[in-house]
């Protein structure tokens, strides 16, 4: 498989900066608290650089943000064309309302959960799959920082019970949800199985509110995602959202249920 050009650029610049600093892969690894084998894997384009790895390398090698800027380009390059538009919308949104009936919402997934999910549900493999793991994780920092969007995430209780990866992966994922729900700008809710059939079961969707106050929707399917802009369609999504939200437990009830589900994954 052809390597993404920006990934090759990152690898080349990392190698150049490391050698200019007179550091071996082992020495750089020690300085940034990563293994020499990981440094080697990134320099050989066998691993995509995670954000923290890029930050540590950039700081240790005095790159002045160069490696971080290249990594941002890698993330844009790794996104499928039809998804780039939504990610741009997501990054600027002041509020996100997300419903997932089958899996944990992407912005709230742990790395191990993402990888296990893609191993089981994606036809991609090798570098292509790893690239998708990295690009998904790269979206998550929008929920951090000084002015994150308000995120209200609703998921079906089935999500807590479906084994994605090992019990250890599931336990860590659910505990991560409890932790994320403690942030002031994140609200997490679960629709209990007792709700029976409800409109949200027709499929996952997200509604993003732009800085101008307009709403846009996003729908995903087996082939590609679709950005929803038509007023009538956005209104339909809002109505479905209200129906879903009405069936969900309170945040306190939801986090309690998630904590209990986490304890069951042993």
Image: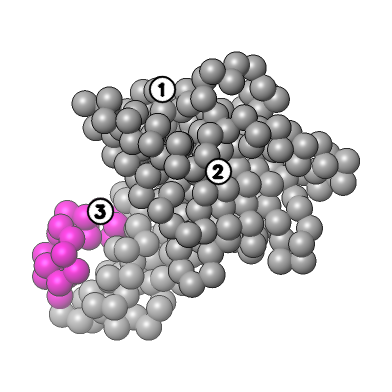
| Tag 2 residue | 153
- Specify whether residue 39 is painted magenta: yes
Q: Is residue 169 magenta?
A: no
Quadrant where the N terminus sits is top left
Hey, which quadrant is residue 228 in on the image? top right
Q: Main secondary structure of the magenta part?
A: helix
- Write down the quadrant of residue 246 in the picture: top right
* Number of residues whose C-alpha sits closer than 10 Å to that of mark 2, classed few (under 14), some (14–19) or many (20 or more): many
User: Which residue is depicted at the point 58% across and 61% down?
Assistant: 149
Q: Decide if residue 152 is on the left or right side of residue 86.
A: left
Q: Residue at x 40, y 78 (%)?
A: 65
Camera-nearest residue between 76 and 127: 76
| Residue hosting label 3 | 41
Is residue 229 shown above or below 221?
below
Q: Residues within 10 Å of mark 3 (few under 14, many from 20)?
A: some
Find the magenta span and give its range: 23-44
Relative depth, front residue between 211 and 122 = 211
Which residue does the image show at 27% across and 25% down from the upper left?
Answer: 264
Sequence-first disc among 2 and 3: 3
Q: Is residue 155 left or right of residue 116?
A: right
Q: Is residue 107 above or below residue 204?
A: below
Mark 1 or 3: the one toward you = 1
Q: CA distance from mark 2 to mark 3?
A: 36 Å
Picture layout, residue 234 above or below residue 18: above
Picture residue at 38% right of the left edge, 36% below the top: 256
Question: Which disc is residue 162 wearing?
Answer: 1
> Is residue 151 visible to us here?
yes
């Amino acid at each position: 498989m052809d390597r993404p050009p920006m990934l090759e650029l990152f690898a080349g610049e990392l190698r150049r900066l490391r050698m200019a600093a007179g550091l071996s892969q082992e020495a750089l690894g020690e300085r940034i608290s990563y293994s020499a084998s990981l440094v080697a894997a990134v320099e050989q384009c066998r691993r995509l650089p995670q954000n923290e790895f890029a930050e540590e390398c950039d700081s240790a090698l005095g790159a002045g943000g160069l490696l971080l800027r290249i990594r941002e380009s890698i993330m844009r390059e790794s996104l499928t064309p039809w998804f780039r538009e939504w990610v741009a919308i997501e990054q600027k949104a002041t509020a996100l309302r997300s419903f997932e009936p089958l899996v944990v919402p992407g912005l709230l997934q742990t790395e191990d959960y993402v990888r296990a999910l893609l191993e089981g549900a994606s036809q991609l493999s090798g570098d292509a799959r790893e690239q998708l793991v990295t690009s998904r994780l790269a979206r998550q920092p929008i929920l951090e920082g000084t002015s994150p969007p308000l995120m209200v995430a609703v998921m079906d209780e089935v999500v807590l019970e479906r084994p994605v990866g090992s019990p250890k992966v599931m336990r860590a994922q659910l505990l991560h949800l409890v932790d994320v729900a403690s942030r002031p700008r994140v609200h997490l809710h679960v629709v209990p199985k007792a709700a029976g059939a409800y409109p949200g079961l027709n499929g996952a969707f997200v509604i993003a509110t732009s800085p101008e106050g307009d709403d846009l929707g996003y729908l995903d399917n087996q082939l590609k995602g679709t950005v929803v802009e038509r007023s009538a369609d956005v209104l339909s999504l809002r109505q479905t959202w209200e129906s879903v939200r009405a069936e969900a437990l309170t945040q306190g009830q939801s986090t309690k249920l998630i904590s209990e589900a986490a304890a069951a994954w042993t």
